[in-house]
Image: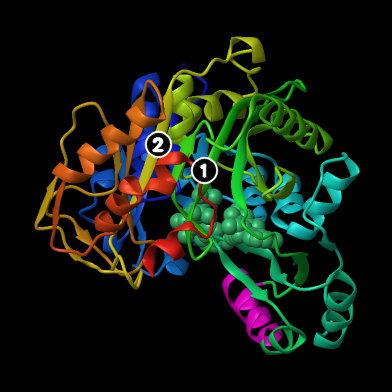
Amino acid sequence: MSYFDKILIANRGEIARRIIRTCKHVGIRTVAVYSEADVDAPFVEEADEAVCIGPAQAKKSYLDIERVIQVAKETEAKAIHPGYGFLSENPVFVRRCEEEGIVFIGPSARIIELMGSKIEARRQMQAAGVPVVPGWDGKLASVEEALFIAESLGYPLMLKASAGGGGIGMQLVHTPDELQKAFDSTMQRAASYFGDGTLFLEKWISNPRHIEVQVACDAQGNAVHLFERECSVQRRNQKVIEESPSPYLDENTRAELLETALRGVKQIGYVTVGTMEFIFDDKKNFYFLEMNTRLQVEHPVTEEITGLDLVEWQIRLAAGEPLPLQQENIKRNGHAMECRLYAEDPQTFFPSPGTLTRLHIPENDVRLDFAVIEGSVVTPFYDPMIGKIITHGHDRADAIRKMEKVLETCRVEGVKTNTPLLQKVMRDEEFRKGQYTTRFLDKLLV
Ligand code: ADP
Ligand code: ADP
Ligand code: MG
């Protein structure tokens, strides 16, 4: 592939390594940018070129738009891959790339802006006839207005930040009293994390499952899905284990879900790889939650069952190529499962930074997408996820069996990790039967 000679990767950790891997495979040179805290990180070593862009604090390095653009120009990188998190969903950054004639590997600033607002995304999806979680799509101006609208919607409700992400900026409220108490703090949290305190209200779905659809679209107007991912094992509304196919879906519901997701992306004229997130209730009704306009942390699950390289697809689509495959040629095979390995206390979820004095994971029959190697330092500055363990089996039981084996034999020392929790999940009867909801981990921990 020769679309771009050189790509700058505006990210770090496992996803930077993941992008480098595909670039090497297709013959594209890579430029890593890194903070002072990441000098010894494997991705810095593995890229063809690497430039330090500032101190550890993300604001002064990975989030410094002008510095990243400057390095892209100096190194003559023709495109920027943003990974996930950081600048990946930042329309200001995308506009700056557009102005400088650098290709942003992702959708346009307009689409990112549209889907970056959960309120606007809900409106767009409703226009396409995609069911959204019952709620109120206005911006809540005051706590009085929130209380008034909550009364008509009925409790329990989810008070949500329109700009939220990463499970941050939402609060479940059961009563007017709880809403009153949560309003100011949720708004302040949203303003400080996302620079936008806009809040709205959604009905709280009880016993929910999070199931999302991987989509890919080209500039010629074609759209395909790459099946679903089940992501209901969560802590603090953030995913910990993902799998595909979802054990909850029958063929009819699956077909309806996949078709609905495609209807949604066609409505907004989406281009490139993206994810439509849905929430299911216990009667198999599903509702649109949000769209993530980037590569997802859990994309390897989809790659394992389809045998496709989503980073390569992103690069080709960003270069203006048509979709590499048509829907009928996208097949799935077996079952894939991913565990996110976090350097954190498995009970309290507090991050556990430190030096990895030992990191030994058998590499047989498993895919390891890791940020670190033995001897790496896990710093307190960024997300504590140190890697992802992905297994692929001929069926779900086989994928679980393989995962259990890896977790049993892996040795991580120097930092606390969530391995004991992951093992507990793999052994759990409810999980093994596939009968779990987003409340599963909380129940497992008591
Ligand atoms: P996914 O939907 O791909 O599973 P997550 O919600 O777990 O993604 O978030 C992906 C990564 O991006 C995580 O490292 C998370 O901390 C980070 N992240 C997500 N949303 C934001 C945001 N709005 N601002 C900063 N970081 C974010
Ligand atoms: P984020 O942008 O932080 O990823 P999402 O809207 O995608 O936010 O929600 C993240 C998770 O929070 C969902 O997967 C689900 O577990 C929970 N959640 C969100 N909205 C609701 C709701 N209305 N009812 C129940 N759970 C919800
Ligand atoms: Mg989400």
Q: Is tag 1's residue or tag 2's residue first in the polypeptide sequence?
A: 1
Magenta stretch encompasses residue 184: yes
Is 444 in front, or is 20? Answer: 444
Q: Is residue 77 visible?
A: no
Tell me where residue 334 sits by quadrant.
Answer: top left
At mark 2, the secondary structure is strand
Mark number, residue 337: 2
Q: Residue at x 60, y 49 (%)?
A: 209
Q: Position of residue 128 (x, y in %)?
A: 87, 39
Q: Position of residue 318 (x, y in %)?
A: 60, 29
Q: In the rendered image of this protein, does residue 275 appear above or below residue 326?
A: below
Is 103 in front, or is 101? Answer: 103
40 lies left or right of 254: left
Q: Magenta segment range? A: 182-195
Amino acid type of the residue that numbered disc 2 sits on in the rendered structure: Met
Magenta stretch encompasses residue 13: no
Q: Residue at x 53, y 60 (%)?
A: 166
Count of numbered tags: 2
422 lies left or right of 170: left
Amino acid type of the residue that numbered disc 1 sits on in the rendered structure: Gln
